[in-house]
Structure formats: structure tokens, C-alpha cells
Image (tube, helix red, strand yellow):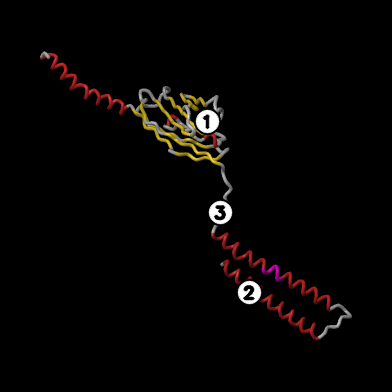
């Protein structure tokens, strides 16, 4: 190899690494930073929002484009479900026809969209892509959408549970005792009708019943007093 060729090869070998570093530097300077939620959960029939934010090293212009693509959980080809350039262009065909709306603000770095009336069949992976020429290089974050049926849930607080445990049994006992008292009072009233003479046994039973009613009244009053003290 002649001397001139050797020098030329050496210069190329020296310039190639520097050129590669320069290219990497340019790509790094012109890259966008896009952030999305790794997973979004929603309920059937209730609007769900897919959030996407971005930062560009250049001012936002009319050349800015935003694209959302979708792939079902079962796999298949990616399909574009939303496009934005100055104005929003929701999908006019496919499973998301007339169900995607623009809720973002490009000037503030917000590229979020909303899905109306989602269903379980909408579950899949969404990708938010943003380009702001000459800032066109960016990461590719993915969002997995999981839509489920909203189940009925009822949670008992400790106060509610305590009230149920304490007051319901007490109410049942009081009602049963009042019913029993009413029946005995009816029997006694029947026996007190004119022409009915009480036997010694009946008189003792009447005294016993009166004594029981007196004790029951005292017990009920004590219960009321106790409940009022517990409330304070």
C-alpha cells in the first residue's frame, strides 16, 4: 500500500467513530420523551382515559403529529385508532369507531385520549407515538388496557358491624317479651270480667304476673339508660 493510501485509510478510520458519536448526539438532541401508564383499568360501559405526556426539545408547531395504535390481547396486527395534527381524527372504522375522543392539549405536552363505552373485548395494548419535526425520535411506551365488569361490593365499617351485633338481638328480645306480656295481659283482663271469681291459684298468678311486669319495666328502663350512656 502506498503512503498516500495509508494516510487516507487512517483518516477514515479516525473520522468514522467521531461521525458515529456525532450522529448519536444529534439523535439524542432531537429525541422526544414520551410517558404513559403501563396499565390502565376500566369498567364496562364507563369512560376510560389513556394518558400520554411528552416533552420535545423544539417548540410545538402545526407539524406535530400524534398517533395511537392498538393491538388486541389475543394478538394480531397493530391498527391506528386515533390521529392528531392540529385537529383530532378519531377512528371512523373498526372496533373503536366513534368511541375515541381527544382529551389532551398538545401545547402542554398532553396527548391523552378517552374511550367511550369500553367492553371486555377492547382489552389490549395501546401505543402513543408523537412526532414534532425535526424532533421525531422517541421511546415507545406501551399501555395495557384491562376492562372488567364492575361488581357489587358492600363494605361494613366497624361501627356498622357493632351496631348490628348489639342492637338487633336486643330488639328481638324486647319484641318477644312485649308480645308475651301482651298475651298475659289479655288473659288476665279476660279473667277480670264481671261474674268471674278468682281462685287462690289465679290470685297468686296475678300477683306473680304483676311482679314480673314490674321487673321487666325496671329492666327495660335500665337498658334505655345504658344505651343513652353508651351514646355519650
Can you identify the residue that label 3 sits on?
155
Residue at the (49%, 37%) spot, across then down: 145
Label 3 or label 2, whichever lies nearer to me, is 3
CA–CA distance in space, label 3 to label 1? 35 Å
Number of residues whose C-alpha sits closer than 10 Å to that of mark 1, classed few (under 14), some (14–19) or many (20 or more): some
Q: Nearer the viewer, residue 221 or 39?
A: 39
In the rendered structure, the answer to whether residue 13 lies left or right of residue 139 reads: left
In the rendered structure, the answer to whether residue 204 lies left or right of residue 165 reads: right
Q: How many marks?
A: 3
Q: Quadrant of the C terminus?
A: bottom right
Label 3 or label 1, whichever lies nearer to me, is 3
Which circle's residue, 2 or 1, is located before the other in the chain? 1
Label 2 with label 1: CB-CB less than 8 Å: no
Q: Which residues are magenta?
A: 173-177
Taking 31 as reference, is 155 above or below it? Answer: below
Number of residues whose C-alpha sits closer than 10 Å to that of mark 2, classed few (under 14), some (14–19) or many (20 or more): few
Q: Pinpoint residue 187: horizontal percent, then vertical percent.
A: 80, 75
Which numbered tag is attached to residue 222? 2
Q: Residue furthest right?
A: 195
Taking 203 as reference, is 76 above or below it? Answer: above
Dot 1 falls on a residue whose secondary structure is strand
Label 3 with label 2: CB-CB less than 8 Å: no
Which circle's residue, 3 or 1, is located before the other in the chain? 1
Residue at the (60%, 69%) spot, across then down: 228
Dot 3 falls on a residue whose secondary structure is loop
Which numbered tag is attached to residue 101? 1
Q: Nearer the viewer, residue 158 or 16?
A: 16
Amino acid at each position: 500500500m502506498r503512503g498516500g493510501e495509508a494516510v487516507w485509510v487512517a483518516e477514515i478510520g479516525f473520522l468514522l467513530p467521531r461521525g458515529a458519536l456525532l450522529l448519536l448526539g444529534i439523535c439524542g438532541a432531537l429525541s422526544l420523551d414520551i410517558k404513559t401508564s403501563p396499565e390502565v383499568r376500566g369498567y364496562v360501559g364507563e369512560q376510560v382515559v389513556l394518558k400520554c405526556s411528552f416533552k420535545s426539545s423544539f417548540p410545538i408547531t402545526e407539524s406535530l403529529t400524534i398517533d395511537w395504535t392498538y393491538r388486541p390481547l389475543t394478538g394480531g396486527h397493530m391498527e391506528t385508532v386515533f390521529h392528531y395534527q392540529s385537529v383530532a381524527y378519531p377512528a371512523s372504522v373498526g372496533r373503536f369507531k366513534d368511541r375515541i375522543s381527544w382529551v389532551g392539549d398538545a401545547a402542554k405536552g398532553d396527548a391523552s385520549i378517552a374511550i367511550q363505552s369500553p367492553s371486555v373485548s377492547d382489552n389490549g395494548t395501546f401505543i402513543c407515538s408523537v412526532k414534532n419535526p425535526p424532533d421525531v425520535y422517541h421511546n415507545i411506551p406501551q399501555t395495557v388496557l384491562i376492562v372488567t365488569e364492575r361488581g357489587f361490593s358492600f363494605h361494613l365499617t366497624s361501627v356498622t358491624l357493632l351496631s348490628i351485633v348489639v342492637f338487633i338481638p336486643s330488639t328481638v328480645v324486647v319484641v318477644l317479651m312485649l308480645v308475651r306480656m301482651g298475651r298475659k295481659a289479655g288473659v288476665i283482663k279476660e279473667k277480670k270480667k264481671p261474674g268471674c271469681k278468682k281462685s287462690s291459684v289465679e290470685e297468686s298468678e296475678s300477683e306473680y304476673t304483676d311482679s314480673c311486669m314490674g321487673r321487666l319495666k325496671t329492666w327495660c328502663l335500665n337498658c334505655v339508660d345504658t344505651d343513652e350512656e353508651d351514646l355519650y
